[in-house]
Amino acid sequence: MKNCMRILSATAVMLAAAPALAGPPVEVTFRNLGTEPVKLQLTNANETSTYQIARPTPLQEVQPGSSITFSVQRLVSPDTNGAMLRYAAGGKTCAFSTTFVMMMSGGIKQPKWNKTATPSGGATCTAVNSGFSANYAWKAEFTMK
């Protein structure tokens, strides 16, 4: 019985500590500016893990003129976070990424946010980071046309 209580106590401590290890959250908005529905494509581990931990879960299909919003917060490190997403319609594809990393520069930690929007098949894709807060949380907006 003592061993069971120790295991339960250790598990509770680890679960309570997990949010302290989380990176800053990112709120992602994806907008379909095109004229046809776009479908989610998960082609790599980063996109799959984003899909699995996003709240709410990103839609599998986004209608023309519609948008979705979700949040991502990884429990890997307080110094990193990111969200990766890919939507496609016909031959057009947009792969999006937004990341945060706390960089060391001259012995001082400095926050750095990155974003990418990679089009293929004639798609037009944009990624914008904004809304930076004191706890390093941010917003990312991805658009596809």
Image (cartoon, helix red, strand yellow):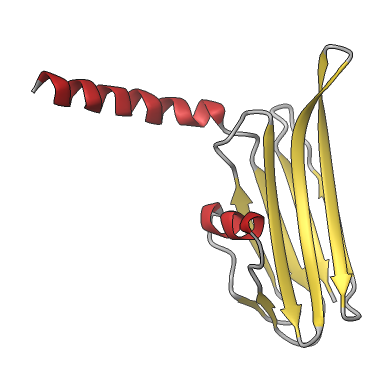
In terms of depth relative to the viewer, which is nearer, 97 or 134?
97
Q: Is residue 141 above or below residue 123?
A: above
In terms of depth relative to the viewer, which is nearer, 6 or 27?
6
Horizontal side of residue 15 vs 74, given as left or right: left
Seen at 55% across and 28% down, the residue is 21
Seen at 87% across and 80% down, the residue is 121
Instruction: Locate the N terminus by quadrant.
Output: top left
In terms of depth relative to the viewer, which is nearer, 49 or 37?
49
Q: Is residue 126 above or below residue 38?
A: above
Q: Position of residue 99 (x, y in %)?
A: 75, 44
Number of residue marks: 0
Seen at 73% across and 32% down, the residue is 136
Residue at the limit of the structure toward the left, as seen here: 1
Seen at 70% across and 56% down, the residue is 84
Q: Is residue 6 above or below residue 64?
A: above
Instruction: Locate the C terminus by quadrant.
Output: bottom right
Q: Position of residue 49 (x, y in %)?
A: 57, 54
Residue 133 sits in which quadrant?
A: top right
Horizontal side of residue 11 vs 96, given as left or right: left
Q: Position of residue 142 (x, y in %)?
A: 79, 61
Q: Position of residue 7 (x, y in %)?
A: 23, 26
In terms of depth relative to the viewer, which is nearer, 86 or 43?
43
